[in-house]
């Protein structure tokens, strides 16, 4: 049931990857394999922004050791990383 959308999960409308920060750990890919993949340079890219539920995407972003996954909600507010 881990893939089910939680009611209180934030609504993610935009995902960015900071390619300069990404160190190719691929934990984002492990957690949300339908959203992220590694490109030829071993950097994470967005394959399908709606590929996994939002709470899974948030978990993937939180798993990134260098906070290279940046998430925005539908109002353009940054949800992750927290400032
Ligand atoms: S978890 Fe972070 S560092 Fe690792 S591949 Fe994903 S974006 Fe890059």
Image (spheres, rainbow, N blue to C red):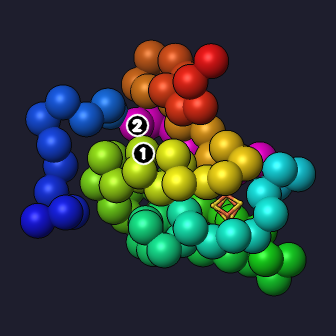
Residue sticking out furthest to the bottom: 40
Query: Pointer 1: what residue?
Result: 58
Provide the secondary structure element on which disc 2 rests: strand
Q: Is residue 9 left or right of residue 59?
A: left
- What is the number of callouts on the image? 2
Give the residue furthest to the front.
Answer: 65
Question: Dot 1: what SS?
Answer: helix
Marks 2, 1: nearer the viewer = 1
Residue appearing at x 32%, y 31% in the figure: 10
Residue at the spot of label 2: 12
Residue that appears at 18% across and 49% down: 5
Can see residue 16? no
- For residue 62, above or below residue 13: below
Give the magenta part as a residue range.
12-18
Q: Please state which of residues 69 and 27 is positioned toward the viewer in this rendering.
A: 27
For the residue pair 67 and 5, the one nearer the viewer reads as 67
In-front residue for pair 27/17: 27
Left or right: 12 with respect to 44? left
**Res 50 → quadrant:** bottom left
**Dots 2, 1 in contact, CB < 8 A:** yes
Say which quarter of the image contains residue 38. Answer: bottom right
Q: Is residue 33 found left or right of 54 in the rendered image? A: right
């Amino acid at each position: 049931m881990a893939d089910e959308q939680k009611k209180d999960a934030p609504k993610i409308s935009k995902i960015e990857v900071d390619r300069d920060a990404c160190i190719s750990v691929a934990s984002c890919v492990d957690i949300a394999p339908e959203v992220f993949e590694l490109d030829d340079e071993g950097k994470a890219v967005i394959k399908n922004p709606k590929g996994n539920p939002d709470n899974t995407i948030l978990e993937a972003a939180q798993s990134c050791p260098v906070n290279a996954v940046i998430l925005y909600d539908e109002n353009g507010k940054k949800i992750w990383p927290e400032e």
